[in-house]
Image (cartoon, grey):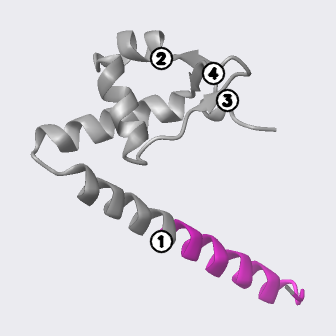
Amino acid sequence: MASYKDKKVITIGIVNELTGLSERKIRYYEERGLIFPDRTKRGTRKYSFADIELLMKIADKREEGVQTSEIKKDMMREKRKKNLREEVLRGQINAHFNRQK
């Protein structure tokens, strides 16, 4: 079962109110591949609380002068590190319990 933080149920207008980011800026971050909202059948964007946290981190970095391309690179590096960490942990658990992958 997915965490409440990951459920995409928040509209762009609410995201705008919560973050203070304009709807145009939120769409721009989507265009740059920094955020990935779900879409309803009618095309309405839906965001999660995790997306809102990510948008706030992006906004903070932008205020510091970091370019969106660099933010994306950093996000990719973090994702690779997280995946590697999970893979190593899974391998350690499997080794401990003598399980094959």
Where does the image place residue 15, in percent across and percent down from the top left?
43, 17
Relative image position of residue 8 (x, y in whole percent): 64, 27
Q: Mark 3 points at which residue?
A: 7
Task: Report the amino acid beneath label 2.
Answer: Ile
Mark 1 vs 2, N-terminal side: 2
In the rendered image, which quarter contains the N terminus? top right
Of marks 2 and 3, which one's residue comes earlier in the chain?
3
Mark 3 and mark 1 residues within 8 Å of each other at the beta carbon? no
Query: Which residue was labeled with disc 1?
Result: 81
Q: Which of 19 and 32 is in front in this view?
A: 32
Q: How far apart are marks 3 and 1 (CA)?
A: 24 Å
Q: Closer to the camera: disc 1 or disc 2?
A: 2
Mark seen at residue 43: 4
Mark 2–mark 3 contact, CB under 8 Å?
Answer: no
CA distance separating discs 1 and 4: 33 Å
Per the model, the C-alpha gap separating discs 1 and 2 is: 30 Å
Helix, strand or loop at mark 2: helix
Which span of residues is magenta-colored?
Answer: 81-100
Circle 2 residue: 12
